[in-house]
């Protein structure tokens, strides 16, 4: 069986995943400097006028909210050259359902799709979830010549 290699961390609180937002900072591990400065600037007039340096107090500190990195991945290889009129939704549905329920990312490798400049050359993409419209487009793609 294939196994995912052990993940190397830069510590227990390593920053992972894409930034999805900003919130009031709970610690100083992943600060959002621009949003912190913007928050401090809102209260600049109240704290001592517009002259002098920008004063940042602990209440102004903001940190990034990050989406967790997926720990599971579904890899789907679609060979459009051999499917003919075969409907592969029923065959793939249990696997796509598993990926949806476990929030796994989906890696799709396609070969032989219609409209490609080189139909025998594989094309691949990675989607963060099964709700990515590229997956449905890949499943509906017509075979090449």
Image: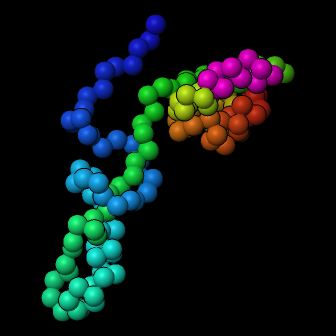
Using residue 83 as the reference point, say whether residue 17 is left or right of it. Answer: left
How did the renderer colour the structure? rainbow
Residue 36 is situated, as x and y percent measured from the top left of the image, at: 29, 68
Q: Nearer the viewer, residue 26 or 80?
A: 26
Q: Quadrant of residue 28?
A: bottom left
> Which region of the structure is painted magenta?
87-98
Which quadrant of the rendered structure holds the C terminus? top right
Residue 130 is situated, as x and y percent measured from the top left of the image, at: 62, 35
Residue 103 is situated, as x and y percent measured from the top left of the image, at: 54, 32
Magenta-span inclusion, residue 93: yes
- Residue shown at the point (34%, 41%) measured from the top left: 16
Using residue 144 as the reference point, say whether residue 53 is left or right of it. Answer: left
Using residue 100 as the reference point, say whether residue 34 is left or right of it. Answer: left
The single residue placed furthest to the right in the displayed view is 85
Q: Nearer the viewer, residue 114 or 108?
A: 108
Residue 67 is situated, as x and y percent measured from the top left of the image, at: 44, 44
- Residue shown at the point (20%, 80%) measured from the top left: 54
């Amino acid at each position: 069986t294939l196994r995912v290699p052990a993940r190397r961390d830069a510590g227990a609180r390593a920053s992972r995943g894409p930034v999805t937002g900003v919130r009031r900072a709970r610690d100083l591990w992943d600060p959002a400097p621009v949003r912190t400065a913007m928050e401090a600037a809102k209260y600049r007039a109240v704290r001592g006028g517009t002259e002098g340096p920008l004063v940042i107090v602990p209440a102004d500190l903001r940190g990034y909210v990050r989406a967790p990195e997926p720990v599971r991945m579904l890899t789907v290889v679609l060979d459009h050259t051999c499917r003919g009129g075969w409907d592969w939704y029923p065959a793939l549905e249990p696997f796509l359902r598993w990926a949806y329920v476990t929030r796994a990312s989906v890696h799709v490798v396609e070969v032989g799709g219609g409209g490609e400049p080189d139909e025998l050359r594989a094309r691949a993409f990675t989607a963060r979830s099964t709700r990515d419209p590229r997956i449905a487009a890949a499943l509906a793609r017509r075979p090449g010549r």
